[in-house]
Image (cartoon, rainbow, N blue to C red):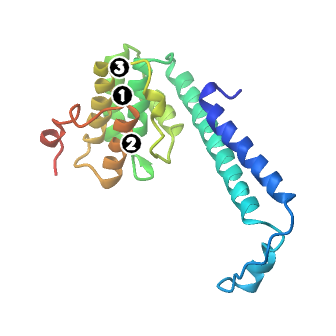
Amino acid sequence: MEPSSKHLPLLGLALVAAWTTIGAGVEANQPQVDRGFLPQRAVDAFADYSLTAVFGAILTLTAVTLIVLRLTRAQRRELRREVLGLPEGPRFNVVDAMVHCVWRGNEIDEKRLERALQIARATTEMDYSEAHIREAALRADRLIGPGSFWHLRDGMTRGERMVVFNAALSVLLEDGPLTPGDRSMLKSLSRGLRLGREDLRYLGKLIPQ
């Protein structure tokens, strides 16, 4: 998969960081710095490197890691799209959000899976079986962070974004009160969908405490 324009900032960061590292590697000898608080082995290990070189190496590693993470997420999303037989768009986004929510801890919750199947059939008019939703869920991202749902930000109206959020919430509530992990999931999803407090003001009445 070739990097898209979304990856260009990260590629730029990697190039700048690499250039910094190379440039620092050919600098003249730096004055000795007292690192008495470090173990001697650590002092010896970094003796031949300037702080600029070390910082550049860290930036390079960070940028490459972020690029790989984004590409991996994109590849997994493409696999889910193929399993579900849907093009990119609101219908796929509804089901895609739900298959991330059928997990409870390290296992797929059967009640949540059944609820996701009901909503998927109703919103997409596709004759899915439980196996379709389970297969897509097995290819869902298991490490959810702030950027996990950023791909949902574009191409949908506010109403469509609310449908995606409400579908995911319905799945999470199917087997009882929300866990801390469920709330973290909803927080990441709402950020990905660019939903603010005004959009979610009704949630206090719907979510059991």
Please give the name of the residue rendered at 44% of the width and 22% of the height, measured from the top-left corner. Answer: 154
Q: Badge 3, how many Cα within 10 Å: few under 14, some, many 20+? A: some
The residue located at (82%, 52%) in the rendering is 22
Residues at marks 3 and 2 touching, judged by CB atoms closer than 8 Å: no
Please, which residue is most extreme toward the left here? 205
Of badges 1 and 2, nearer the viewer stands: 2
Label total for image: 3
Task: Give the labeled residue for mark 1.
Answer: 117
Choose top left, top right, bottom left or bottom right for residue 50.
bottom right
Q: As shown in the figure, which amino acid type bears the numbered disc 1?
A: Leu
* Pointer 3 or 2: first along the chain: 3
Structural distance between the alpha carbons of marks 3 and 2: 25 Å
- Looking at this view, is 116 or 1 the one in front? 1
Secondary structure found at label 3: helix
Q: Secondary structure at mark 2?
A: helix
Kindly identify the residue that appears in the image at 45 percent across and 52 percent down.
Answer: 106
* Residue wearing tag 2: 188
* In contact (CB < 8 Å): disc 3 and disc 1: yes
Inspect the image, locate mark 3, and give the three-letter code of the amino acid beneath it. Answer: Arg
**Earlier-in-chain disc, 1 versus 2:** 1
Which secondary structure, mark 1? helix
Q: Find residue 120 and report its horizontal and vertical position in percent.
A: 36, 23
Quadrant where the N terminus sits is top right
Give how far across and how far down residue 123 sits, in percent: 33, 18
The amino acid at mark 2 is Ser
> What is the number of the mark on residue 121?
3
- Asked if residue 34 lies left or right of residue 106, the reply is right
